[in-house]
């Protein structure tokens, strides 16, 4: 289980970079301007949604990490399914939340929306790249015999 960045494919790179951009946007860049001319970051202005955004962004980083550190595809594929589903839900919630907040959306809100959509696309691309194996004579399906071994 050695960390090898060369294992990263386009989907994991998009998902990982989008997740990092989303985390930076969530904590550093102002998302909304309120009536008193005060700006608030996504973390400050989205008290319920912030936990989902932070969790999904961390999962996007973990997706890239697991792909780079595991030889077998089981864990990266499972994370691709989870991240694709949760980031799609998160993107829809951010779309709904932007015009319904009491403040005026700023650059950070739109950056967060784009980063969450890109995270969804990256995770989906990662998931779609797993379907390239086709069993044939050179690549048979491995089977495990159940029961006691038989001797000829």
Image (tube, rainbow, N blue to C red):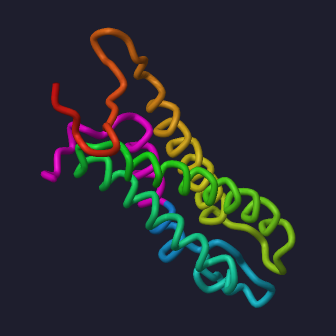
The answer to whether 35 appears left or right of 46 in the picture is right
Determine which quarter of the picture holds residue 41: bottom right
Numbered disc total: 0
Q: Give the residue furthest to the front.
A: 152
Q: Residue at x 84, y 66 (%)?
A: 99
Q: Position of residue 135 (x, y in %)?
A: 40, 17
Most frequent secondary structure within the magenta stretch? helix
Tell whether position 43 is magenta.
no
Quadrant location of the C terminus in the rendered image: top left
Tell whether position 14 is magenta.
yes
Residue nearer the viewer, 114 or 39: 114
The image shows residue 96, relative to residue 51, as above or below, that is above
Q: Residue at x 63, y 82 (%)?
A: 40
Q: Residue at x 50, y 42 (%)?
A: 122
Q: Give the residue furthest to the bottom.
A: 36
The answer to whether 47 appears left or right of 150 in the picture is right
Q: Position of residue 31 (x, y in %)?
A: 64, 72
Q: Position of residue 109 (x, y in %)?
A: 65, 65
Residue nearer the viewer, 44 or 104: 44
The image shows residue 117, relative to residue 136, as above or below, that is below
Which portion, as a residue range, is magenta? Answer: 1-21
The image shows residue 121, relative to residue 57, as above or below, that is above
Q: Residue at x 50, y 39 (%)?
A: 127
Determine which quarter of the picture holds residue 108: bottom right
């Amino acid at each position: 289980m050695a960390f090898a960045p060369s294992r990263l494919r386009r989907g994991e790179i998009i998902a990982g970079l989008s997740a990092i951009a989303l985390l930076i946007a969530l904590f550093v860049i102002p998302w909304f301007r309120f009536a008193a001319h005060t700006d608030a970051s996504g973390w400050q202005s989205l008290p319920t949604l912030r936990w989902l955004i932070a969790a999904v962004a961390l999962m996007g980083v973990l997706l890239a990490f697991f792909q780079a550190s595991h030889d077998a595809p089981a864990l990266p594929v499972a994370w691709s399914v989870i991240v694709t589903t949760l980031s799609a839900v998160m993107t829809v919630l951010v779309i709904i939340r932007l015009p319904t907040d009491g403040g005026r959306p700023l650059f950070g809100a739109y950056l967060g929306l784009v980063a969450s959509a890109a995270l969804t696309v990256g995770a989906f691309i990662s998931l779609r790249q797993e379907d390239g194996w086709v069993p044939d004579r050179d690549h048979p399906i491995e089977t495990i015999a159940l029961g006691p071994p038989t001797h000829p």
